[in-house]
Image (cartoon, coloured by chain):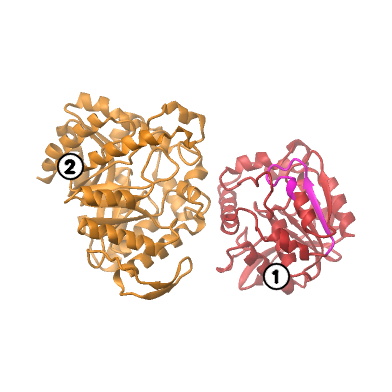
Chain colours: A orange, B red
Amino acid sequence: MDTYYFTEMPYAAFPESEADKFPSMRLTFPNTYFDPNTAHDLFKRYLDEFQFAEETGFDGLMINEHHNTPSCMDVEVNITGGILARVTSTAKILMLGNMLPTSDNPVRLAEEIAMLDVISGGRIISGFVRGIGVESWANNSNPVYNRERFEECHDLIIKTWTTPGPFRWEGKHYQYRAVNPWMLPIQQPHPPVWVPGTGSPETVEWAAHNHYTYAAFLTELTVAKELFQNYRTIAAADGWEPGPDKFAFMICCHVNETDEKAQETGKAFMWRMGHPLRGPKEYFAPPGYFSQAGTAANARRRSRPLNAMSYQELQDDYHLVVGSPETVTKKLRHIKDELGIGALLLEAQGGPMSHEDTMRSLKLLGTEVIPALRD
Amino acid sequence: MAATFTEEFVEVAGSKIHVMKGGSGDPLLVLHGAGGNPGWIRYAQALADKYTVYIPSHPGYGQSERPDWLETMNDMACFYTWFMEKQGLDGARAIGFSMGGWLAAEIAVACQHSFSKLMLVDAAGIKPETGEITDIFIISPAQIQELLFYDPKQAPEYEQLYGQEQTPEQQQAAELNREMAVRICWKPYMHDRRLPALLGRVTIPTQIVWGRQDQLVPVECAELFKNAIPGSKLSIIDNCGHLPQIEKPDEFIKIALDFMA
């Protein structure tokens, strides 16, 4: 099982109570709270932490992208991907991922990801995402067409990587006269494709049909199990059997020298589990974004939203694993055994967690927990 | 005045369209707003005393099917010229409410002969110069409901239309209506930049009606429509929100019947 380090590169340098004054910390939270010089320092720090994660033993580094939110300063996964491609040398770079439906230029995306694969020497994992509902607003991309644009954008990117150019593309949402980018990926036939999900049945089905790795994000273990089982059932119907490499699971994780210390420093994750998940229903589920089946599945699965759960409840449900190296090893092993996953994605920096606490946690994870999980 | 209407499905462009129909006399086509077809209510019955009133649910709304290709307001206008042709409604009188007013305006600019008289009520379709059309997609149905009226107490049918909590089935139907509105009105939101220029072509008698306190489509749009459509008349109803036909039905019905006569 590979272990990945992930941070959303949050900007928590303002009083958290300010968020209470607005409907959400996303989309419409005013950017007057943003200070670019503070962000400059944060980027330096976060990129150092990514480098250190590679040095200390993580197999991969995961980056993501959001818009209009202090919870994630990464606004372009291919920019951070480019930096990591150059400042690291062995870790896989998991971009989870490029938002396909909001892109108006899939060929440009195909070029950019190919260029990253070339610069990194074939270390790119190309995650493709629909973008949460907020991204439809922030990018003014019609949510009704989110899934069809996702699928057509994907089809065109894969064809761009695998079919000798030039060729023409006359699709519903995208049209090109001469698809023929000079830049093509090192990995053949193309970089691995991963897709994240929290429950939409269509996403699991689509991932299984395409043999892509499905990454369950902050779901309960029982839900992840159900989603993975759906994947296996669809794969079986298609006549193939997925190995552990087709399943990934993302949680928050923090290690300190003792359980007591970890419980204290790990509280920083409550920032991430709070305001960034709060907001009007329409922000997260614009009309048409979820299919009727997806809405029904979500309603059935999530008994309580994460931001209504206590620190202890989040830990009880394995959304957040906090403790000494021994405690965390035991819990992560439980997750690994329960889910049969090939990749564990650890969000090991969150909210206002300090550089010092992050570095100590990364070191303990890299030198004690990850080796123990390999046994 | 008993409600007397029938319901039927008619096939247009391979899709089944739900139509409410009642009354007698010359045909009068009613085009509903983004929220969907509110049904056969007081104003419809009053108009049906003089006219044969047709209230279709737009493609993708309520029980009406949507042809796969229908994705824009212009597609919708094209669809409706087909519908009117099949129903023998060419040259009918027409009323368009809100988004349905935008639709009626698009039909009129596409085909001058579609209507003999046109009434636009708190119509979307033209971008305000100073204000904004309220984004109804990013707010909740309850918030929209609050913005619809100047004073809900003066709407005699308020209780009947909004008084009861929706069943899960009604909620789902409302969500699907909203999804259809998103499909055709997302961007540019609720307007078409060409429309003011193209409305210069419309020479049929046109009556514009607006609630002065409309909180969804600002009353300045009433003037913009009036300036765009040669010879059009404007009636602004005081102390009234986005739905004059429901909030001030008697005033609305009088204006409508006077104009349609």
Secondary structure state at the residue bearing disc 1: helix
- At horizontal 38% and vertical 65% (from top left) the residue drawn is A107
Q: Identify the disc placed on residue A2.
A: none
Task: Point out residue B193 in the picture as x, y percentages from the top left corner.
Answer: 65, 58
| Residue at horizontal 33 percent and vertical 44 percent from the top | A219
Residue sitting at the far left: A375
The number of numbered discs placed on residues in the rendered structure image is 2
On the image, the x and y values in percent for residue B153 come to: 76, 36
Q: Which residue of the protein is positioned furthest toward the front in this rendering? A: A37
Is residue A164 on the magenta stretch?
no
Q: Is residue B22 above or below residue B143?
A: below
Numbered range of the magenta stretch: B204-221
Which residue is identified by label 2?
Answer: A333
In the rendered image, residue A373, in percent from the top left (x then y), is placed at 14, 43
User: Which is more toward the observer, A5 or A319?
Assistant: A5
Q: Chain of mark 1?
A: B
**Looking at this view, is B257 or A295 the one in front?**
B257
Badge 1 amino acid: Phe
From the viewer's perspective, is residue A350 above or below residue B94?
Answer: above
Q: Amino acid at mark 2?
A: Arg
Q: Position of residue A365 (x, y in %)?
A: 17, 38
- Of residues B254 and B46, the one nearer the viewer is B254
Q: Residues within 10 Å of mark 2 (few under 14, many from 20)?
A: some
Q: Is residue A25 left or right of residue B89?
A: left
Nearest to the observer: residue A113 or residue B9: A113
